[in-house]
């Protein structure tokens, strides 16, 4: 019985038992039929006109309907109920916690042992627990499990176990390599020009100095290259090398934008793909390729990573306006103060053309920041950005749902965890 | 008739015609017999006791005998005559000038086209003509020719030509990749800590700023990774990734030395290998591997690059004391002013133990610099460093001489050019 049906059946069970009274039951029944439709058992009902519901639906575990098209709404609702059940059982980060600490220790000791001078930087690198540091490796380890080949009965189990372990180690390497590349880019991003004194932002290089920050980043990049070469798969090397290149291109796009580029949503999304989504998507694809999956399956893994990354950054950009410094772990309003125009402001500029002039003046003057925030407040910039994030989250989830069926419990658990992570990315507040 | 005999015969001809009168003829005859012995036709004469000749031998084209052991002496003399003949005909850099400008333009346009903001950095990158910028690609293109497979008669020439061209392009790629890695390390090396204001040294980052300097370096490193992956040879990827790692390790060794490490010749040579020789040796080996050569031949290519790189850096460190800012293209006495202890000073410290204390005090105080230079002047530090460079140059040349015989004129010319480059590295004044 494939996992899709398991999910649909659980919705039905929710409908029958929900404490929310008749209204909730009817609504759960409706959700069940749309979920079934979604899952390809019946043709989906004609999608209703786009309209806005800004209310909290009683009896559905405090699920909030953001302004929605009916289909998304149902999917979100189905998953919200389905997940909330499973969420109590398995936190996705917990599922791979042991492997993660193994990875983090391996990385820290590798850096500290090899180049003692960088040991101080190593501490900053792989602090287990800081959410940002566990996101990528968790996604990749779960993806590796989500794509596990079903063990065929004919092959001698002993041999398969060895093969499976060897493959798992290679996929763990991808997670390590991705983390090294990610942290290297953090180290290099924080290197400031002499002109930019440190604005109270505790960046990496102000702890260790520009030189060491650059060297530590280079060390990790070179280590990642050596580890990549050791995998002996040139397609994977190429994928990860491209991801490194995208990080640089994305960073360069950020520090060198023309007036038109700063106003362009396409430019912003392209930069966001380069800076955030490319590394996750290409490493997800690498995990699939290492496991010998078809181009189609590898593409699904890629699509999951790409859309998850975009959703992640879109919400990050929302939080830069709505979160607090403490909750964000970095100064809030950082982007706008650095003159970086993100989706919420771009949407606000669509609604209030006069905001263009404010943006063109730049944001060195705090009064100009306040003016821009006023326009943002009056606009639907934040909501539209959340919707866009929601769309990408849904595409990410669709990619997981389109993976070849499996009855392996470990595979099903991992796929649910990947969906859970996607939902968390959308609903997180830091 | 193998190239070795061609060289030996030329010496004989020199002996018979030299304008140096009887003395020169007798001496040329002696050189011929020792050259023949060296080239494996007769057992070499018992090597005479080590002694010092500081005189200019008349009649041998102004060849200067550095303090020498007889065998090195003869080899040096044979080559000096042999080369001086060939030097008039073919300047090694000219041999590959066309290919070099093709490479330089390709690199410059690739950077400028892809990331316009980095175009300004690109100009600095690949300025054709600056000796430092042509050294590595020239060595690699000559090594590729020096290792060319003899065309076997049986294979259809058309096919072979295509294969040869394809191989040549792949070996050109190694030269490009090496140059990208080299320039990236230059860009990152120059990123200074805030504490180090720019001491009148026009470094890269003071033209473009730390941030852009780091980004430009990362861009080149990521491009090098993508180009490496495209070669589809994981052994080559691993070699070059290791070279990148060595650059970082060498740089880290330079900025973080203990008191003992600063006094250690071994530490200095290990750092010198990492910072300079590793990239040349591993890329020479990569050129051989791409051509499908045996491990032995690939090791000879590696040995040539390693010893050439060490000789290059040893002379660089001599010139930092003896050259002028103008001639060096960078400030002279840079090393000692940055507290970097190189071979000349290490040899001087062996002769004058009291110099240790001066070194330990560091060189922020100009008076301490003067004191150290006085000791260096009184010591044989400069000469001993030149001798060590000479030894490594001889080993590099031995590696070329040990390559499989070939009658292909292009191969012979390239091997002579590699030897010529090695000699130039020793005799250069900038």
Image: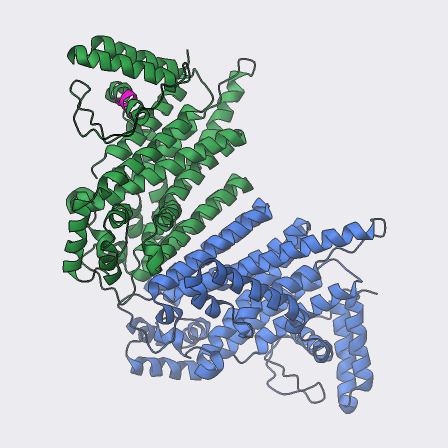
Chain colours: A green, B blue
Q: Position of residue A106 (x, y in %)?
A: 36, 39
- Is residue A261 found left or right of A169 in the rendered image? left
- Look at 76% across and 64% down and name the residue there: B40
- Is residue A329 found left or right of B111 in the rendered image? left
- Look at 31% across and 27% down and name the residue there: A72
Q: Quadrant of the N terminus of chain B?
A: bottom right
- Look at 31% across and 14% down and name the residue there: A32
Q: What predominant SS class does the magenta segment belong to? A: helix
Q: Is residue A104 visible?
A: no
Query: Toward the viewer: B56 or A58?
Result: A58
Check the image and report above or below for A406 versus B177: above
Query: Toward the viewer: A303 or A58?
Result: A58
Check the image and report above or below for A11 versus B29: above
- Is residue B117 located in the magenta-colored stretch of the structure? no
Q: Quadrant of residue A103?
A: top left
Q: Is residue B83 visible?
A: yes
Q: Position of residue B223 (x, y in %)?
A: 49, 54
Q: Position of residue B422 (x, y in %)?
A: 62, 71
- Look at 25% across and 19% down and name the residue there: A81
Check the image and report above or below for A2 versus B161: above
Q: Which residues are magenta?
A: A76-80
């Amino acid at each position: 019985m494939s996992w899709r049906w398991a999910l649909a059946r659980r919705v039905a069970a929710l409908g029958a038992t929900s404490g929310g009274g008749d209204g909730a039951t009817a609504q759960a029944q409706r959700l069940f039929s749309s979920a079934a439709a979604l899952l390809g058992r019946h043709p989906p009902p004609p999608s209703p006109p786009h309209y806005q519901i800004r209310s909290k639906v009683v009896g559905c575990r405090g699920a909030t309907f953001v302004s929605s098209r009916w289909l998304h709404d149902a999917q979100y609702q189905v998953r919200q109920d389905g997940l909330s059940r499973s969420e109590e059982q398995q936190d996705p980060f917990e599922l791979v916690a042991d492997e993660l600490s193994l990875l983090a220790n391996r990385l820290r000791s590798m850096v500290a042992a090899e180049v003692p001078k960088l040991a101080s930087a190593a501490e900053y690198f792989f602090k287990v627990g800081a959410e940002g540091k566990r996101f990528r490796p968790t996604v990749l380890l779960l993806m590796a499990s989500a794509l596990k080949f079903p063990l065929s009965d004919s092959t001698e189990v002993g041999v398969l176990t060895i093969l499976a372990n060897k493959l798992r180690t290679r996929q763990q390497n991808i997670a390590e390599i991705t983390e090294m590349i990610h942290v290297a880019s953090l180290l290099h991003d924080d290197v400031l020009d002499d002109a930019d004194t440190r604005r109270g932002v505790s960046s990496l290089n102000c702890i260790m100095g520009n030189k060491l920050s650059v060297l530590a980043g280079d060390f990790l990049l070179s280590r990642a290259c050596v580890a990549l070469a050791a995998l002996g798969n040139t397609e994977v090397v190429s994928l990860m090398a491209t991801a490194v290149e995208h990080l640089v291109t994305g960073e360069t796009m950020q520090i060198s934008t023309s007036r038109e580029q700063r106003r362009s949503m396409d430019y912003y999304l392209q930069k966001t793909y380069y800076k955030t989504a490319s590394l996750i998507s290409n490493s997800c694809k690498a995990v699939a390729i290492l496991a010998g999956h078809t181009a189609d399956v590898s593409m699904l893994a890629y699509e999951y990573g790409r859309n998850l990354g975009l959703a992640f950054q879109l919400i990050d950009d929302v939080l830069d306006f709505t979160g607090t410094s403490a909750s964000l772990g970095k100064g809030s309003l950082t982007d706008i103060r650095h003159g970086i125009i993100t989706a919420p402001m771009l949407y606000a500029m669509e609604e209030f053309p006069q905001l263009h002039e404010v943006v063109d003046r730049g944001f060195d003057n705090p009064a100009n920041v306040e003016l821009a925030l006023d326009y943002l407040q009056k606009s639907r910039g934040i909501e539209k950005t959340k919707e866009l994030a929601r769309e990408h989250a849904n595409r990410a989830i669709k990619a997981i749902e389109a993976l070849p069926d499996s009855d392996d419990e470990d595979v099903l658990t991992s796929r649910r965890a990947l969906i859970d992570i996607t939902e968390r990315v959308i609903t997180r507040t830091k």
